[in-house]
Image: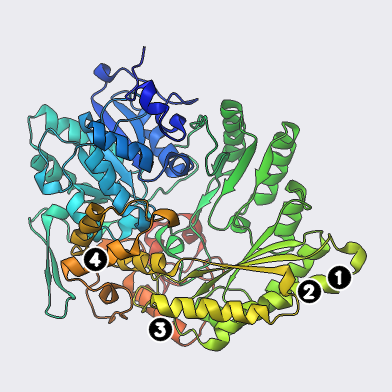
Amino acid sequence: MRKLALTDEILLKVEKPARYLGNEINRVMKNANQVEIRFAMCFPDVYEIGMSHLGIQILYDLFNRREDTWCERVYSPWVDLDRILREKQIPLFALESQDPVREFDFLGITLQYEMCYTNVLQVLELSQIPLHARERTNEDPIVIGGGPCASNPEPLADFFDLFYIGEGETSYPALLEVYKANRAAGGSREDFLEQAARIPGIYVPSLYEVTYKEDGTIASFTPQKPFVPATVQKQLVEDLTSAVYPRKPLVPFIKVTQDRVVLEIQRGCIRGCRFCQAGMLYRPTRERDAHMLKECACDLLDSTGQEEISLSSLSSSDYSQLPELVDFLIDTAGNRGVNISLPSLRIDAFSLDVMRKVQDIRKSSLTFAPEAGTQRMRDVINKGLTEEDILSGAGQAFEGGWSKVKLYFMLGLPTETEEDIRGIPRLAEKIARRYYEIPKEQRNGKCQITISTSFFVPKPFTPFQWAAMNTQEEFLSKAHMVNQELKEQLNKKSMKYNWHEADVSVLEGVFARGDRRLGAVLEAAYHKGCLYDSWSEYFHPEWWQEAFAQEGISPAFYASRQRDTEEILPWDFLDMGVTKDFLLREWEKSQKELVTKNCSQQCQGCGAGRYGTGVCSSHRDLGKGGCPQ
């Protein structure tokens, strides 16, 4: 019988003990003595968020298909259990076996959001693994990071043995084989890391040296051994249809953030929004075949009993086989009483028709993401939407029975003016007026519009990676301007306005484009008590300010300073598929308010054509002024 890591006495003292029990439906159990590699897969946030992450489910399935490997899960313990683990010196444990994480061969940590970085240190410390990679011995797990934030791993370089760059389905098998061979040969931890550095997509920070100029910018970033690559290339799944996809995903015993099964229909996005990191990192756009997805959908519903299925994509409307797939799901899932969720749809006639088939219009709301309030600003960010597109889509939605609308915008975008800021509430007002233009008998009650503004954070590998970021005071001033303008609108009673925390956004911006020197700040903040920084009730900006002052580092150097295009950026040693020349062209076009066609219309030579797959394989002009081969 499996012994729990926590006693009943402890479990009764914590909120939601089911977070720590494991034993969920479809979990994988193996005999620890009959496998060669034990891998602890960690999401550094609370269980309910981690269990909602598709990437963890994919890698969990990928690793556990191997007879020689047992992959288990670990999440950040909530603050109540964190305190108990420290007081009683109980090491952090994996859910399946309840064994201490420090006994595993690998601790893999997915890096989805910069504001989870203190939770990374929490996981290491509670696991009783040395925080610094240089202090670990052969007795400690290999700590590996991956995910979108690995597109700039430098702020975390001190704490990780290696980083995986790109999509996990490709190079992980080779990494595990190298690990087994090194151990069989009696090799050391250092031997393994040196061999791992030869594997495509693997970055070992300890094998590189960084020097800085007097002004604080990077002077050089140099491999320390001849076999260490100067550039680490992103790994990419070329054929998504034949790639591993979990047919029996884990089913939690408590309600989680995304309490549904997820069907990933494609990766990447053709649109080319200049602020969007995901749209650049996951190029080129690749689809899964509809036949495979139909089979997978049936398997997912059969193996989980879930009551909702969600189609996952950055832009679901662009999936070429969407009508066929949706019709199948309506026939199949609808007969089972299963809801169908379609996020990331563009609001046009086709998408509205699809949503009308699968949603209860009277209960549901529509989400628009114009991102900017004026056409000038939408051209700067290459959103690809005109005001007519927005108002026409809203009108069709209202005529179709919807009355609840959520609008998402960003404040602080490059070149933003007061007119652009005031354009946000004015566009919302036009949308509200559009509702009252339709005949009264067609209206579905009162129009309800919720406006949300986030604050723009420049991210690596986007055309805006060189842009200056607004200060906290500037962000708040702009949010108040939107709020004041809304108060003057005639339909203000129909509108509600929310905005993101400015201090959190600024800190996110610091770590998004930071270098190795920020590791000391992160550690200082963590030791002061910073944890769960993405949760507003636990965010302590004053502790972060003290940590920056203590280490003599200015946040403004990383956030509000516009980068010179000749400057060496902390992530320049990574090749994420899009070239720096392409990003620079897009940065310059944004300053001129020029729009770039999307990938389905014309190849823009971004560099992703080298992979020869997905949308890139359909362009005949590759290598002729298009993407390099």
Instruction: Give the alpha-carbon distance from disc 2 to disc 3, as whole Å.
Output: 36 Å
Instruction: Give the alpha-carbon distance from disc 4 to disc 2, as whole Å.
Output: 50 Å
Q: Which comes before the other along the chain, label 1 or label 4? A: 1
Rendered view: 19 above or below 36: below
Circle 1 residue: 438
- The amino acid type of the residue labelled 2 equals Arg
Q: How many other residues sit within 10 Å of disc 2, few (<14), some (14-19) or many (≥20)?
A: some
Q: Which comes before the other along the chain, label 4 or label 2? A: 2
Q: Which comes before the other along the chain, label 3 or label 4? A: 4
Judged by depth in the image, the label closer to the viewer, 4 or 2, is 4
Q: Nearer the viewer, residue 348 or 424?
A: 424
Q: Which comes before the other along the chain, label 1 or label 3? A: 1
Secondary element type, mark 4: helix
- Which residue sits at x=45%, y=70%? 275
Circle 2 residue: 434
- The amino acid type of the residue labelled 3 equals Glu
Rendered view: 469 above or below 324: below
Residue 418 x %, y %? 53, 87
Residue 546 circle label: 4
